[in-house]
Image (cartoon, rainbow, N blue to C red):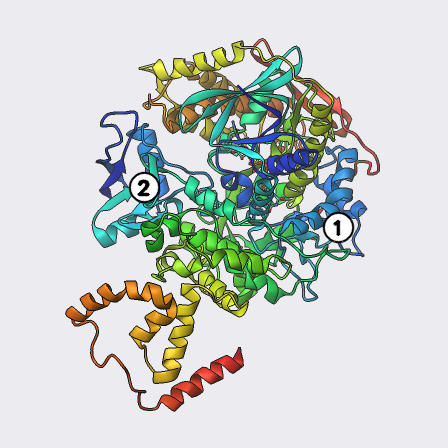
């Protein structure tokens, strides 16, 4: 079947400078053909100037990430006909949240820097016994998902928090932190948790789930971030807005059986920063987003809710 | 010009291991790679890495299996080192952070692999290479080793028999750079892309071997190319030997486990050359299915498949549209591994002062005529480390030699010629013709007529390459140019492969001549050597080192 493949291009040295433009190519596609094979076909037969990265062509090296019809994916793992069937067109563009170098090639150095900054190496407390460490299957399993990461940048490209805060640790580096925090041999767990509990850390994740959705290796970085949050609170690292937010939430539900926004804000942000939120509160009020009453009575059946919370706490 | 004590070319397992070792000696080490380190081909290794870890296994048994697997062409002194040093190297990888899969008692689990007399293959599920590459990359960051990422080496600077550094193309800018060093370690991997149907990454174009040959080093045993028995029909993507190690069957169209006719004892786990030939025979004699045989792992059950072979399952679904839990996977042999490479001793020394090589681009030789699964990752680690150590010793005891200017000029001239040529032949046309020829005539089965044809064709293509022409004339990320430069390398290596295969009038390991179907120890128990004289490849031979295992007939 002959289809049009549109590619968002940009050549810093060629015509138009860095101004991106869409170029369409007619391609005969066959069942089973991947986006990467399509790109290679275009490059070999129609236009050698098209640039993209590729290496393993089997979804393990992380080179070929790009955006297909608005969704970040691995080119080598994505069948072009499936994409075409849904949207009746195929538009390929470079990963978002990164600077474009040329065509589909982006500058991933912010990703490498973030990985580098977390001290991404095991810091064991002691030497293993002769013959090696004894590690149970369950302990291996605990970091199995994080160990699958191929550092392709797809999660960073889809990440809403990274979009508004380029300094945000980002899903891939956070998953990597958990890879060490969850390792039974690791000794630097607390220090790692302290670091990611600070600004631009795990509490800045907006839990939009995009990284979990898009990850081609099912690493589920957002789940790693949640695991880090749990570990951080367990370690008593609660002196930050994120952790206080969680505590306030539990507290609110425990008290009245629902979210008490006003008290919740005070607890999370502290007195001074909460005062700064008053204009926002007023605007919310004007838009009818803060229904009365502002002070909640406990819901019916609150005892049951409290019972549930107690049960969960005991289980932990 | 930038100066380092040691420049390591290639950031796969061998290169990274070498760099870590050299940096431990306190030297200024840089790593150059045409892709980011974790994009290197090593990351795709699935099945595992061999070491005699258990009390009832021994390095001698491992060495014997390796030598037998090599069809007695491996140098036994090197094999002894490989097998003796294996356990310590595996444990060190765990100290660095790797986690291998465990057995019930929490120790490192080991699975059976082809042609092993003991289940000796350590693995991290079916992504062993991925685990190890990421761990070594972590150690590179920890050691603060400088990485020139997406820099392609285009020539080695060798004058008066001494290596002084390299010339690189920075892909992001298109600029050429000189890296001046006391020692250079080549760890550029294999040349799978010489063939059309291959398990290898698209970047595996044997650059380091071609550069070394041009710089005056010798290549060895180039005719020995491993064809892996289980690669996906359309793409050549690998299905690990681990699938058979875990109990998978190979079936022909009649549903027969045909290996019983070829290797009654080891069956599916006979050595790779034996299984590939058996498959090809079944296919050629009409008992295949659509040019393939079937790999059946259904009887392992979904749970075990998910636990031990989850990536394989996903690959078969994504790239062949088949879920191996429910259907057998069509597979066929595909070019997989370069047994040959740059001739080195057990310390990675190439014969050119200051130039070392390790990993798949080197030929020590520990694999001889046929490599055992799980021995290549081991080789990258063991010999990467040794090359790093020896290069560090050398660099610590020598002065920096002057860096002649002409190398940069020559490289710039060559690239300008390609960029400025407006009409000529596309690199992709030449590459397709080359890889189809190699698959057709220099594959699992070979004979004189086809080999001669292939050699003539390769020489013709090398001639045509002089007029190669590309579309992209830009500086920034010009992958068109990169592909053309790589093509030059695979053309040169293809010629060496054809020559070696044509000359070797016997069948040994992966090299099978229909016209000379027997192994001939009297005339051919020797390594072939290739060097470049006046632009032409010359062949020579040298003896095999035999220490404890005298050649015997090989049966599985
Ligand atoms: C699919 C697959 C699965 C495998 N599974 C196993 C297994 O289970 N067990 C096993 O033992 N073996 C396995 N092998 C073999 C093994 O993976 C390889 O032999 C080994 O990884 C090679 O490592 P290396 O470090 O020598 O080279 P590579 O990992 O190939 O690295 C080469 C490096 O050199 C760089 N480079 C190349 N040319 C240039 C240049 N011109 N300039 C700059 N840099 C350059 C590349 O960027 C790369 O960083 C497998 C092979 C394949 C194809
Ligand atoms: S090419 Fe390696 S992940 Fe796609």
Chain containing mark 2 = A
Q: Judge whether residue A178 can be spotted in this image.
A: no
In-image side of B374 versus A33 (left or right): right
Chain containing mark 1 = B
**Foreground label between 2 and 1:** 2
Residue at numbered disc 1: B52
Task: Identify the residue at image location x=74%, y=48%.
Answer: B87
Task: Identify the residue at image location x=37%, y=45%.
Answer: A75
Q: Judge whether residue B459 can be spotted in this image.
A: yes
In-image side of B490 versus B81 (left or right): left
Question: Where, by quadrant of the figure, is residue B162 drawn?
Answer: top right
In-image side of B468 versus B282 (left or right): left
Question: Where, by quadrant of the figure, is residue B533 drawn?
Answer: top right
| Residue B147 location (% of width, % of height) | 53, 33
| Residue B343 location (% of width, % of height) | 68, 25
| Residue B362 location (% of width, % of height) | 64, 30
Q: Is mark 2 within 8 Å of ligand 2?
A: no
Binning the other alpha carbons within 10 Å of mark 1 as few (below 14), some (14 to 19) or many (20 upward) gives many
Are both tags, 2 and 1, on one chain? no
How many marks on residues?
A: 2
């Amino acid at each position: 079947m002959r289809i049009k493949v549109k590619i968002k291009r940009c050549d810093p040295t060629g015509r138009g400078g860095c101004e991106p433009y869409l170029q369409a190519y007619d391609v005969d596609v066959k069942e089973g053909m991947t986006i990467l094979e399509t790109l290679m076909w275009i490059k070999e037969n129609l236009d050698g100037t098209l640039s993209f990265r590729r290496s393993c062509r089997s979804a393990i090296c992380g080179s070929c990430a790009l955006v297909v019809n608005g969704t970040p994916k691995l080119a080598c793992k994505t069948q072009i006909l499936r994409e075409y069937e849904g949207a009746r067109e195929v538009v390929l563009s470079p990963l978002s949240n990164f600077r474009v170098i040329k065509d589909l090639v982006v500058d991933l150095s912010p990703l490498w820097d973030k990985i580098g900054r977390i001290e991404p190496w095991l810091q064991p407390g002691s030497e293993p016994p002769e013959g090696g460490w004894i590690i149970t299957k369950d302990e291996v399993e605990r970091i199995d998902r994080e160990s699958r990461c191929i550092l392709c940048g797809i999660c960073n490209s889809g990440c809403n928090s990274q979009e508004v805060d380029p300094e945000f640790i980002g899903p891939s580096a956070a998953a990597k932190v958990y890879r060490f925090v969850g390792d039974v041999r690791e000794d630097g767990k607390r220090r790692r948790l302290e670091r990611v509990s600070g600004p631009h850390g795990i509490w800045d994740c907006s839990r939009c789930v995009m990284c979990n959705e898009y990850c081609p290796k099912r690493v589920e970085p957002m789940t790693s971030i949640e695991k880090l949050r749990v570990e951080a609170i367990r370690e008593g690292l609660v002196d930050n807005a994120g952790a206080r937010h969680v505590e306030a939430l539990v507290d609110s539900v425990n008290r009245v059986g629902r979210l008490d926004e006003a008290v919740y804000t005070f607890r999370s942000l502290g007195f001074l920063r909460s005062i700064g939120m008053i204009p926002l509160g007023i605007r919310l009020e004007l838009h009818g987003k803060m229904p009365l009453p502002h002070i909640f009575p406990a819901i019916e059946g609150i005892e049951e809710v409290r019972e549930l919370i107690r049960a969960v706490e005991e289980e932990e | 010009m930038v100066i380092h004590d040691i420049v390591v070319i290639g950031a796969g397992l061998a290169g990274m291991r070498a760099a870590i070792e050299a940096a431990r000696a306190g030297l200024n080490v840089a790593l150059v790679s045409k892709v980011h380190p974790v994009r290197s081909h090593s990351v795709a290794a699935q099945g595992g890495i061999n070491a005699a870890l258990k009390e009832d296994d021994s390095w001698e048994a491992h060495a014997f299996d390796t030598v037998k697997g090599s069809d007695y062409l491996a140098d036994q002194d090197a094999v002894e080192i490989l097998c003796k040093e294996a356990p310590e190297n595996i444990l060190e990888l765990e100290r660095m952070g790797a986690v291998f899969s465990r057995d019930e008692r929490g120790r490192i689990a080991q699975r059976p692999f082809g042609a092993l007399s003991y289940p000796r293959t350590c693995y991290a599920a079916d992504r062993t290479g991925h685990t190890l590459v990421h761990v070594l990359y972590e150690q590179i960051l920890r050691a603060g080793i400088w990485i020139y990422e997406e820099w392609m080496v285009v020539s080695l600077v060798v004058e008066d028999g001494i290596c002084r550094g390299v010339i690189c193309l920075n892909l992001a800018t298109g600029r050429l750079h000189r890296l001046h060093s006391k020692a250079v370690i080549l760890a550029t991997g294999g040349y799978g892309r010489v063939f059309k149907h291959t398990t290898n990454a698209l970047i595996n174009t044997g650059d380091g071997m071609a550069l070394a040959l041009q710089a005056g080093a010798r290549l060895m045993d180039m005719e020995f190319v491993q064809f892996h028995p289980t690669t996906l029909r359309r793409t050549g993507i690998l299905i690990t030997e681990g699938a058979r190690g875990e109990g998978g069957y190979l079936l022909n169209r009649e549903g027969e486990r045909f290996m019983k006719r070829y290797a009654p004892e080891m069956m599916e786990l006979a050595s790779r050359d034996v299984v590939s030939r058996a498959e090809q025979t079944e296919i050629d004699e009409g008992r295949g299915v659509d040019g393939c045989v079937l790999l059946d792992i259904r009887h392992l059950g979904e749970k075990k498949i998910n636990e031990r072979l989850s990536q394989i399952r996903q690959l078969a679904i994504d790239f062949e549209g088949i879920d191996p839990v429910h259907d057998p996977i069509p597979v066929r042999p595909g070019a997989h591994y370069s047994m040959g490479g740059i001739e080195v001793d057990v310390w990675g020394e190439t014969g050119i002062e200051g130039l070392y090589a390790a990993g798949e681009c080197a030929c020590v030789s520990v694999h001889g005529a046929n490599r055992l699964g799980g021995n290549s990752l081991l080789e990258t680690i063991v010999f990467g480390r040794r090359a790093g150590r020896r290069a560090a010793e050398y660099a610590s005891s020598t002065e920096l030699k002057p860096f002649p200017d002409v190398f940069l000029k020559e490289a710039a001239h060559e690239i300008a010629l390609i960029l400025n040529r407006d009409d000529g032949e596309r690199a992709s046309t030449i590459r397709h013709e080359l890889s189809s020829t190699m698959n057709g005539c220099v594959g699992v089965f070979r004979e004189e007529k086809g080999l001669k044809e292939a050699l003539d064709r390769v020489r013709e293509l090398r001639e045509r390459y002089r007029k190669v022409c590309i579309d992209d004339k830009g500086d920034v990320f010009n992958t068109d140019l990169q592909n053309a430069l790589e093509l030059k390398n695979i053309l040169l290596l293809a010629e060496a492969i054809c020559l070696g295969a044509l000359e070797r009038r016997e069948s040994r390991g992966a090299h099978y001549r229909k016209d000379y179907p027997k192994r001939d120890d009297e005339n051919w128990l020797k390594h072939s050597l290739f060097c470049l004289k006046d632009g032409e490849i010359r062949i020579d031979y040298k003896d095999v080192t035999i220490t404890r295992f005298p050649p015997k007939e090989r049966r599985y």
